[in-house]
Image: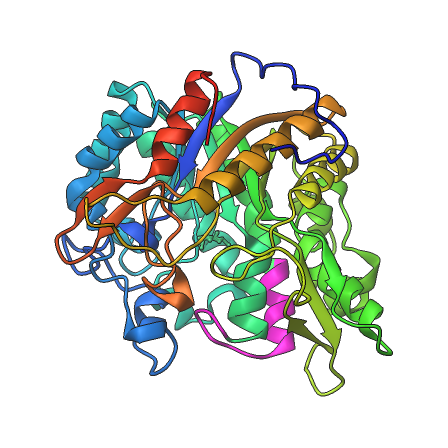
């Protein structure tokens, strides 16, 4: 399958050092939320809000990765991945977010990192994939400017402990998503729905990023540091008055509010005025620190429509009815992925790593206890072709990580939507590699990736 209609010519092979990987995150897979001294996070709280999560699911057990990490590293070894991106649960290391350190929590990531290195898999450590310690949210969370110090102190702890073995660090996963969904729309934790809280959170997360880049560089001289951005084209859902403006606004928040100040030193023009009240002299220089790469998470285009009654003046909208979609309804548009990679390369001039891409489905094993997932294979084939097309057109894309290694706790949809290359039977915790896992292993091994 070719992403570039009209091009049937095979792409040149990827360089030998191209990084194939898989990604996960702490709250989505670890479970063991009340084990070995871990403190509560805002997601533990959110899962207990009636109606917040489909089916009343929680991350209490998830994939029980906390206890089964060795099996999961063995699965990665079978896939042949060179790299694994995971996140550290801040409340596991610092149960109250700051202050007393939890040695048992630190020891867990020692074991995980050592197991990865023994399997010749490079650890890519993300400091924040949304599980803020609840004790810090009680103080205002990201709306409190003190969060900059809380976060950089936590980063220093991580760097001291693991910096001898870990060199790849991401400050944040998808800051645009957790701030918009958590502080503006109130869909995700901490479920605050207030524009001023949203704008403060944006600014403080940016400051925390800048401060943490400095901390990581000073404590881990060989550190390779970046931030992971969810980047998708934003389209108007209709032709009504204000729809194009709504899409431009969503684009500024979603695609620009973090990478622009972090890498270019300014907020996008469309939101500069609303950010100004929270800025202090010198802030943009504190935010704009040299990074080594740009992390892209990409799934498919997103849509907005005008909504005068909405606090931000726009509303999230569904894709048009007639577009190709994944089994869970997300738009499939590999050419948009290619264009996104080209655009990121041109705008930010950094090496690009795709740190999440994948397809969700509602699945179950067949009578032979196998999981055939041709739609996921088709998606991954089309998107990796699009990546090759972007490289051929000059984008400096150096790695690709599938979301996700395992089926896991998919935020508001709980366990209903599965993104794994490996099926997880939650009642027994049995792992069953899907057909897509074999497909990905062949792709990595450089064998013909027949679907
Ligand atoms: C991304 C998140 C990740 C996962 C995928 C499907 O936005 O970073 O945790 O939920 O979507």
Q: Nearer the viewer, residue 32 or 24?
A: 24
Vertical position of residue 403 compared to residue 384: above or below: below
Percent across and percent down for residue 386 are 65, 34
Q: Nearer the viewer, residue 38 or 236?
A: 236
User: Quarter holding the N terminus?
Assistant: top right
From this viewpoint, is residue 444 visible? yes
Residue sitting at x 34%, y 58%? 97
Vertical position of residue 57 compared to residue 284: above or below: below
Residue sitting at x 35%, y 34%? 437
Left or right: 38, with 361 as reference point: left
Q: Quadrant of residue 85?
A: top left
Residue 195 colored in magenta in the image: yes
Vertical position of residue 117 compared to residue 378: above or below: above
From this viewpoint, is residue 145 visible? no
Residue 9 colored in magenta in the image: no
Percent across and percent down for residue 259 are 68, 46
Vertical position of residue 182 compared to residue 149: above or below: below
Specify how the rendered protein is coloured: rainbow
Q: Nearer the viewer, residue 110 or 150?
A: 110
Residue sitting at x 32%, y 72%? 47
Q: Residue furthest front?
A: 367
Percent across and percent down for residue 64 are 19, 50
Residue sitting at x 65%, y 19%? 10
Left or right: 323, with 450 as reference point: right
Q: Residue furthest bottom?
A: 309
Left or right: 96, with 187 as reference point: left
Image: magenta residue range: 187-203
Percent across and percent down for residue 153 are 42, 47
Q: Nearer the viewer, residue 12 or 209?
A: 12
């Amino acid at each position: 399958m070719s992403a570039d209609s009209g091009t049937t010519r095979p792409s040149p092979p990827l360089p030998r050092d191209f990084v194939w990987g898989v990604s996960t995150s702490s709250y989505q897979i670890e479970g063991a939320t009340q084990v070995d001294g871990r403190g509560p996070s805002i997601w533990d709280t959110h899962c207990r809000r009636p109606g917040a999560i489909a089916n009343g699911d929680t991350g209490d057990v998830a994939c029980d990765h906390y206890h089964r990490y060795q099996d999961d590293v063995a699965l990665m070894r079978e896939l042949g991945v060179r790299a694994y991106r995971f996140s550290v649960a801040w409340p596991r290391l610092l149960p109250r977010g700051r202050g007393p350190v939890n040695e048992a929590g630190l020891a867990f990531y020692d074991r995980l990192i050592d197991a990865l290195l023994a399997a010749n898999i490079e650890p890519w450590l993300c400091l924040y994939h949304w599980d803020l310690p609840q004790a810090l949210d009680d103080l205002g969370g990201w709306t409190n400017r003190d969060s900059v110090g809380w976060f950089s102190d936590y980063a220093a702890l991580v760097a001291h402990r693991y910096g001898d073995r870990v060199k790849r660090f991401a400050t944040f996963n998808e800051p645009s998503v957790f701030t918009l969904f958590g502080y503006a729309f109130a869909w995700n934790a901490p479920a605050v729905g207030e524009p001023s809280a949203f704008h403060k959170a944006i600014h403080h997360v940016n400051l925390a990023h800048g401060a943490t880049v400095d901390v990581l560089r000073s404590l881990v001289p060989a550190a390779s540091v970046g931030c992971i951005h969810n980047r998708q084209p934003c389209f108007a859902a209709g032709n009504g008055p204000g729809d194009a403006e709504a899409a431009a606004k969503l684009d500024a928040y979603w695609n620009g509010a973090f990478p622009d100040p972090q890498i270019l030193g300014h907020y996008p023009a469309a939101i500069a005025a609303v950010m100004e009240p929270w800025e202090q002299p010198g802030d943009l220089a504190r935010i704009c620190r040299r990074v080594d790469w740009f992390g892209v998470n990409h799934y498919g285009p997103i849509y907005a429509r005008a909504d005068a009654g909405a606090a931000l003046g726009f509303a999230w909208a569904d894709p048009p009815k007639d577009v190709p979609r994944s089994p869970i309804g997300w738009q499939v548009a590999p050419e948009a992925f290619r264009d996104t990679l080209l655009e990121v390369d041109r705008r930010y001039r950094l090496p690009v790593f795709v740190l999440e891409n994948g397809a969700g489905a509602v699945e179950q094993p067949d009578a032979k206890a196998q999981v055939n997932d041709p739609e996921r294979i088709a998606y991954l084939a089309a998107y990796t072709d699009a990546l090759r097309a972007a490289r051929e057109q000059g984008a400096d894309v150096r790695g690709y990580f599938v979301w996700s290694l395992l089926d896991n706790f998919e935020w508001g949809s709980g366990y209903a939507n599965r993104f794994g290359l490996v099926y997880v039977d939650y009642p027994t915790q049995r792992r069953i590699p899907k057909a897509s896992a074999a497909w990905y292993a062949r792709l990595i091994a450089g064998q013909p990736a027949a679907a």
